[in-house]
Image (cartoon, rainbow, N blue to C red):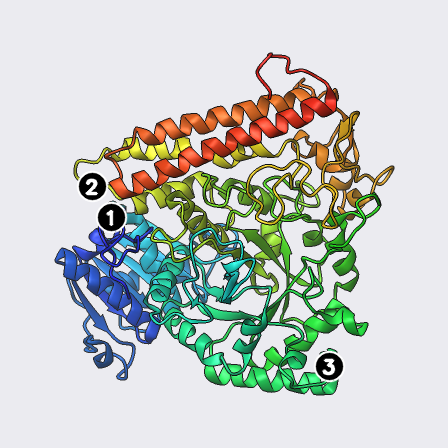
Amino acid sequence: MTPPGPPGSPDPYGVHPAWLPDEAFRPIGSRRTLLRGGGPLAGTVHEEVARACARYGGSVRRQAAGPDDGAATGGDDRVETGGPYDLVLALTAAGPLPAVAEAVLAGFRRGSVPDDGPAAEGRSIEDEGIGEEGYVVARRDGVTVVLADSAAGLLYGLFHVVRLGEEAFGAERPAERHRPAARLRMLDHWDNVAVHPVMGQVERGYAGGSIFWRDGAPRDDLTRVAAYGRLLAACGVNAVAVNNVNVHAAETRLLTDRLGDVAAIADRLRPYGVRVHLSVNFAAPLALGGTATADPLDEDVRAWWAAVTTRVYEAIPDFGGYVVKADSEGQPGPHAYGRDHADGANLLAGALAPFGGVVHWRAFVYNHRQDWRDRSTDRARAAYDHFAPLDGRFRDNVILQVKHGPIDFQVREPVSPVIAAMPRTRVALELQVTQEYTGQQRHVCYLAPMWSEVLGFRPWGPAGPGVADIVAGGVAGGGLVGVSNAGDDPYWTGHPLAQANLYAFGRLAWAPSSDPAAILDEWIGLTFPPAAGRDHRRLREALHEIMDDSCGTYERYTAPLGVGFMVRPGHHYGPDVDGYEYTPWGTYHFADRDGVGVDRTRATGTGFTGQYPPPWSEVYESLTRCPDELLLFFHHVPYGHVLHDGSTVIQHIYDTHFAGVEEVERARLRWAELAGLVPAALHARVRELFAEQLRCAEEWRDQVNAYFLRKSGAPDAQGRHIP
């Protein structure tokens, strides 16, 4: 694995350490550690601690759980319960433990502890374990103790101590249990094996090329993949799909004669508990010549998938499963054979079930050849119309993967009604970490506040469960899936500050109720750790000022009141108000001389509001009750319509677009003040990107304001210049 470099700058191999710089390991590396536990993941824990100790002068002793492990990793498998130790990392089954660890474990087993997972706070855990990936952390009698039932939990516990830093070795700390709310915390890479003539090596990738593939082949050196797995484990991600959901010819063959390429990637991610998944072509049996059809009810097709899947697990025993985009935007699917999505998903689920695998079946299905003049056709309705009637027909190992909104990852959409419409189906929430519609990692746009709002949305009102409860509900939940924003750029995400989105996705997938500002604070503390001569408080305050509401800033200079998709067709960067308005992909604002917005009401529009349960079906239906930020998503209104804050729609458009540009300028100047507090190369990269963000924000302001001035004929009340 590539060794990390100096804090905040690319290492000698040209790769930035992101949130795992060496300095973040100083508190652990300068102390005495005992590790009790065997197996490969415990070996990873040992390697992490040993590397830190070698740099900072501490020591680590590993005692394996059994006779087969200690010597293989250079550890010592003698039973030793003495010390002294500053840190004990131990599997609960690897006793005997040091007395302080036994005391923590005994207290945990007979008491109740605060819990950040799906369990209620403080409930009795006498009959429960710590959990498959969970851990308990405490500080007692001058020793920090991390206990876990599994080596995966021990690995996550280690990174918890890294996040705490010196605080982990300070005051006494009562036992706390930490375990993930969602079992599946997954990233989908839209990476192409062969370079696509339109989309390139990575579709919707804004951070360079793929870390897995290059020019039709796997990368010769997969060292970076291991470093990536390390970063993912440190924020809680445990699964990765390694190829694009739009599966082309080269990717189709990953199932068969190119399976060894996938296995090589899995080998690099396995030491960090990250399982590999594969996006597959639904028509693979036909495309590869194995059958005469891809009909999901055909026995030959079923046999083909069963045989291929068996070979996949022979090559990759911990393989996670398949990801499928079917009957969507030209991808093949079961509709070609008169079958439905349940038939298609269940075909693959049947092949995966004997091995414990799952199929992620994406709900992103709509008519992309619609007539823009037909106002009864509504892209927002499509996923619900396709999938809600199928609830209860999917096998237990099918996960319906639903985008967070009903359109396509816009900066402002309502929560998809599909999430509440499938109570008998495992549903996963899909978020777009890569910033396709939010600045393409050339703009600062910290997405965690938006994601947190989605996760906290309660479809049945304040007394009902939230989205996080539905998608992260233990075994029954489908988990969280993010479209990765990482590439082979030296800073991983192109924009160094976009790393915060990747980190925040993992942390919210682990604990959906986490405060986005607190997550950002974690990321800042890890990525820019305190150092001599650095005013860390000033740096931290400035980054919060720049990033906390950066998503709101982006919304202000781009998308007014729930209108989206005013982007240039194809690459989706920069403004084009009518770019998609009269195309087969959909119509999104219906602006004319009298007003703007899409009527999605039951009374006079497309009926989309009826896809929500009460009370939201009534709230969105009502012109007076609909939240202003979603007004134009649900209603077509005159430009003079008065919002709840007393402003008119047209004046709101003008004001927010001017304000958004002003906020970008303030952020740019604030960043300029940080010269000398962050590495020069990183500062220069962000400074250049801020210049582009300001240019683009001004373009958005001018084009959107000019468009609506000409449509409405209403001047800006403040008399500002509009081109």
Q: Position of residue 229 (x, y in %)?
A: 38, 63
- Of marks 3 and 2, which one's residue comes earlier in the chain? 3
Q: Amino acid at mark 3?
A: Thr
In the displayed structure, 175 sits above or below 353; it is above
In this image, 71 relative to 708: left or right? left
Farthest-out residue, front: 197
Q: CA distance from mark 3 to mark 1?
A: 55 Å
Q: CA distance from mark 3 to mark 2?
A: 63 Å
Q: CA distance from mark 1 to mark 2?
A: 9 Å
Camera sees residue 644? no
Q: Position of residue 657 (x, y in %)?
A: 57, 26
The residue nearer to you, when weighing 471 against 6, is 6
The residue nearer to you, when weighing 624 against 597, is 597
Q: Residues within 10 Å of mark 3 (few under 14, many from 20)?
A: some
Q: What number is the disc on residue 140? A: none
Camera sees residue 666? yes
- Of marks 3 and 1, which one's residue comes earlier in the chain? 1
The residue nearer to you, when weighing 392 against 611, is 611
Q: Quadrant of the C terminus?
A: top right
In the displayed structure, 551 sits above or below 711; it is below
The residue pinned by badge 2 equals: 531
- Of marks 1 and 2, which one's residue comes earlier in the chain? 1
Q: Secondary structure at mark 3?
A: loop
Q: Amino acid at mark 1?
A: Pro
The residue pinned by badge 3 equals: 293
Q: Secondary structure at mark 1?
A: loop
The residue pinned by badge 1 equals: 7
Q: Position of residue 590 (x, y in %)?
A: 76, 35
